[in-house]
Amino acid sequence: MKNILKQSNIILVLILVTITSCEYHQATKKDLTTGAVTKENNLKCAEVTIKQNNNIVKTNTLSYNDEIVIIFDEVIGLKKQSNNLVYPAMSMNIIKNDKEVIISEPNLLKDLNGTDLTPLQLSASFKAAFDYETPGTYKILIKIWDLKGDGTITYEYSFKLKAADDEAFIIEKSDGVSYKNIYLINKNNNKVVGKVLDAKNTYSLIFEGLKGLNNTDKVYPDFSIKITDNNGKLVYNYTHLLQQYETVGVDAKLVEKSLFTNISFKNISIANPYHLTALVKDLKTNNYIQVKSIFELK
């Protein structure tokens, strides 16, 4: 009887050790701010960080056209091979409204061919430039796994998109015309900017999702921009920017997708702040929209 009890205790101890071991290699972490969930199974990472245009953020609302990077710091648990390398893999999927796949990357590390980097940092990045005209929520699903073992890390994060800068431009007046998004982009690095611009750079003013300009398949546009400084001096007066289309017209779908013009500030005496007014008008219907923005130069 004692032997049976002793054997039972050994079995019980083994079971407890096995359970403890499983629990040690499995963990679920939830970010209380964003709700992002990280599940670890025989792989671990010290921290998951979200960067938006190189700035660390803790938010579920990302800005349209921004560069987003999800960083996994100090990934451990990958099985080291005889050549002292480990072989991680990473997939990324972004899904809209739980059904539409916006981005699908089966293995972002397919060209890595092993690494001996310690501590190991892995990252997945994307540009939030996909269409969001139809309201909805987005979910990013990332999986890290060991090509030479059975360890995994899964990460799930939900977010919404907003305009590039909700306060950078406001509608001053409009008649029958609306837009989805308007922003200034720095042509030197292709990044959206807000209310402080560098006078050395060239920028593009971009309208997206313009609607209400046409009665037919063509638009006959008038596009103009005025910029005045703090003293009321007219710095730029760009008129008839699309003069070549004013009589022949242009495909309405192209205009709806993107209407833009370039702006530069070379050889300008800085007198902040500056007031920008942009007008888009259909010469056939007289429908129009006028927006304004206030910015500073440095």
Image (cartoon, rainbow, N blue to C red):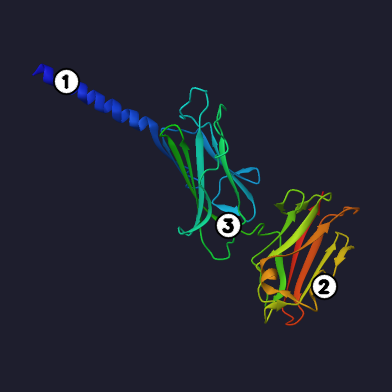
Instruction: Say what secondary structure mark 2 lies in.
Output: helix
Residue shown at 53%/31% (left/top)?
74
Q: CA distance from mark 3 to mark 2?
A: 35 Å
Q: Nearer the viewer, residue 17 or 274?
A: 17
Residue shown at 65%/73% (left/top)?
211
Q: Which residue is mark 3?
A: 161
**Which quarter of the figure has residue 120?**
top right
Q: Earlier along the polypeptide chain: callout 3 or callout 2? A: 3
Could you say where residue 94 lies in the image, as x and y percent from the top left?
A: 52, 52
**Which quarter of the figure has residue 109?**
top right
> Is residue 196 shown left or right of residue 180?
right
Could you say where residue 113 lies in the image, as x and y percent from the top left?
A: 55, 33
Q: Which label lies toward us, 1 or 2?
A: 2
Q: Which mark is residue 244?
A: 2
Q: Amino acid at mark 1?
A: Gln
As drawn, the residue found furthest toward the top would be 2
Q: Can you see residue 201?
A: yes
Above or below: residue 266 compared with residue 232: above
Q: Earlier along the polypeptide chain: callout 1 or callout 2? A: 1
Q: CA distance from mark 3 to mark 1?
A: 61 Å
Q: Are marks 3 and 2 in contact (CB under 8 Å)?
A: no
Q: Which mark is residue 7?
A: 1
Q: Amino acid at mark 2?
A: Gln
Above or below: residue 56 compared with residue 204: above
Q: CA distance from mark 1 to mark 2?
A: 92 Å
Q: Amino acid at mark 3?
A: Leu
Could you say where residue 237 lies in the image, as x and y percent from the top left?
A: 87, 66
> Is residue 129 shown left or right of residue 185?
left
Could you say where residue 8 lies in the image, as x and y percent from the top left?
A: 16, 23
Q: Nearer the viewer, residue 53 or 228?
A: 53
> Is residue 36 shown left or right of residue 124?
left
Q: Earlier along the polypeptide chain: callout 3 or callout 1? A: 1
